[in-house]
Amino acid sequence: MIVADIMYSFGDVKTPNPASVELLEEYLMDYMESLLMKAYQRAIRRDPFSTKLLKDDLLYFLKDNSKVLARATYMLKIEKEFSRDKKIMGDMGGPS
């Protein structure tokens, strides 16, 4: 359902063809799997004794696509600001 909603937000019809949704979902899963495998292999090269992925491991493979890299960097910045604001609100005794 999420892929259909994304397609709609990019200008497709409200209920896109299920075959189109399935195909796009397959492309997305393949892309994510490939990206995560590359990032994992980079993490292993960085530290053979750790299996922890860092944000930089993922961002490294987005560097060739400036639009995607800018969006990912922006989303990380927003997430950091949200976490900071949430902590401040918690420290002030505000709603959590």
Image (cartoon, rainbow, N blue to C red):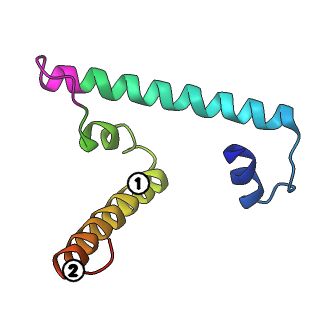
80 relative to 25 in the view: left or right: left
Residue 88, x across and y down, in percent: 20, 77
Residue 38, x across and y down, in percent: 36, 24
Residue drawn at point x = 25 percent, y = 33 percent: 53
- Residue 77 colored in magenta in the image: no
**For the magenta stretch, what is the residue range?**
43-52
- Closer to us: 88 or 54: 88
82 shown above or below 66: below
Mark 1 nearby-residue class (10 Å; few <14, some 14–19, many ≥20) = some
- Closer to us: 1 or 21: 1
Residue 48, x across and y down, in percent: 13, 17
Residue drawn at point x = 32 percent, y = 69 percent: 82
14 relative to 26 in the view: left or right: right
Q: Earlier in the sequence, mark 2 or mark 1?
A: 1
26 relative to 75 in the view: left or right: right
Where is the C terminus found, in terms of image quarters?
Answer: bottom left
59 relative to 84 in the view: left or right: right
Residue designated by label 1: 72
Q: Are marks 2 and 1 in contact (CB under 8 Å)?
A: no
Please state which of the two labelled residues, at mark 2 or mark 1, is closer to the viewer: 2
- Closer to us: 78 or 93: 93
Mark 2 nearby-residue class (10 Å; few <14, some 14–19, many ≥20) = few
47 shown above or below 76: above
70 shown above or below 58: below
**Residue 57: quarter of image:** top left
Residue designated by label 2: 93
Label of residue 14 in the image? none
Under circle 2, the secondary element is loop
Residue drawn at point x = 77 percent, y = 37 percent: 21
